[in-house]
């Protein structure tokens, strides 16, 4: 009886006073005492009178959103488990709240559908739409990649091994070259954060992916040692000036002009010395080619 009386008091108050319910003192406490079904009844009645976007129905809508917030969090958490770690839960919840708001506005109880069933689809769809809007890969590429993955898994289970490229192309009714192009396009569908941990847990002991990223410009230490040894062997018979020119030109990357300025020589003189040294080294390598591991 208490909830019925409170509901009637709300109806009387909103009908007798033109002031929106959001400005009535104590309306929030009164709404909390009502059941969800009673709030729905008041919401639909007021929406028919003032329109679905009227400010007077905001208290009812806000109360309904507050009561269904755990459902939004549940759906967002379920979706987060299938998404990269770079996606934040709060972003999914924010997108889900817009879906919940649209579901409340568009729900029609006369259709005989439960609101939970109806809003679950709208919340999930709103979150997925938000994710697609931020996706840098076209949706068609992801659909093709998903189709390839499904065919690959099906053939692997059927054959007991991973299918060949031609077998996969035949199963998908595609030419091998066409399948290759589709797979190359689908390979760019994933993006990874270099700040992510290698382990699932975020312990301080687990390293980040960027720590093991290969530096394409770094020199191979083994190759560097071999080059140093080979250069030392090749230049051991040269004079200090000749060895300096070879090292500065091939190791330091200086030009003939810069080397000439270091040695107080003209550029043409440095070039002449360099040519003489190279002729002698070529002759030396020709004699020792059988004893060198090239």
Image (cartoon, helix red, strand yellow):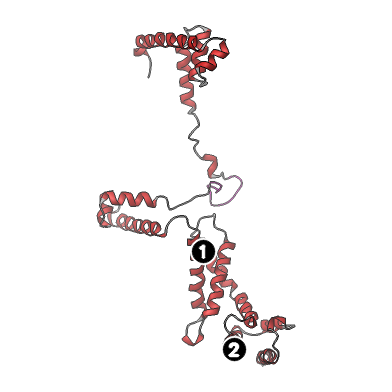
Quadrant placement of the C terminus: top left
Which residue in the protein does label 2 denote?
Answer: 49
Q: Is residue 162 visible?
A: no
Magenta highlight range: 194-205
Q: Is residue 13 visible?
A: yes
- 222 above or below 256? below
The chief SS type of the magenta part is loop
Which residue in the protein does label 1 denote?
Answer: 130
Question: Which structural element holds mark 1?
Answer: helix
Between residue 161 and residue 139, name the one nearer to us. 139
The answer to whether residue 234 is left or right of residue 152 is: right
Residue 177 counted in the magenta span: no
Quadrant placement of the N terminus: bottom right
**Where does the image place residue 290, in percent across and percent down from the top left?**
34, 13
Instruction: Specify which label sits upstream in the sequence, 2 or 1.
Output: 2
Q: Residue at left 35%, top 9%?
A: 287
Q: Residue at left 48%, top 19%?
A: 250
Residue 201 counted in the magenta span: yes
Residue 44 occupies which quadrant of the picture?
Answer: bottom right
Q: Residue at left 37%, top 56%?
A: 145
């Amino acid at each position: 009886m208490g909830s019925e009386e409170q509901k009637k008091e709300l109806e009387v108050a909103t009908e007798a006073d033109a002031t929106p319910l959001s400005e009535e003192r104590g309306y929030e406490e009164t709404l909390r005492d009502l059941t969800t079904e009673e709030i729905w009844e008041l919401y639909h009645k007021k929406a028919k009178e003032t329109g679905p976007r009227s400010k007077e129905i905001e208290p009812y809508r806000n109360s309904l959103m507050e009561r269904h917030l755990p459902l939004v969090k549940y759906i967002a958490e379920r979706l987060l488990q299938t998404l990269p770690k770079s996606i934040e839960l709060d972003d999914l919840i924010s997108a889900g709240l817009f879906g919940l708001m649209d579901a409340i506005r568009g729900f029609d109880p006369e259709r005989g559908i439960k609101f939970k069933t109806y809003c679950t689809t709208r919340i999930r769809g709103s979150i997925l739409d938000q994710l697609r809007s931020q996706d840098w890969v076209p949706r068609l590429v992801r659909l093709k990649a998903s189709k390839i993955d499904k065919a690959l898994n099906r053939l692997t289970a059927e054959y007991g091994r991973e299918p060949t490229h031609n077998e996969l192309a035949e199963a998908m009714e595609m030419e091998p070259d066409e399948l290759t192009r589709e797979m190359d396009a689908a390979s760019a569908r994933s993006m990874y954060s270099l700040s992510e941990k290698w382990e699932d847990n975020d312990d301080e002991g687990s390293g980040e992916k960027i720590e093991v990223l290969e530096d394409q410009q770094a020199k191979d230490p083994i190759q560097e040692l071999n080059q140093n040894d080979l250069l030392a062997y090749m230049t051991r018979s040269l004079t200090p000036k000749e060895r300096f020119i070879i090292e500065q030109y091939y190791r330091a990357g200086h030009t003939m002009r810069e080397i000439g300025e270091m040695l107080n020589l003209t550029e043409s003189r440095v070039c002449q010395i360099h040519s003489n040294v190279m002729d002698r080294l070529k002759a030396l390598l020709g004699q020792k080619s059988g004893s060198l591991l090239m």
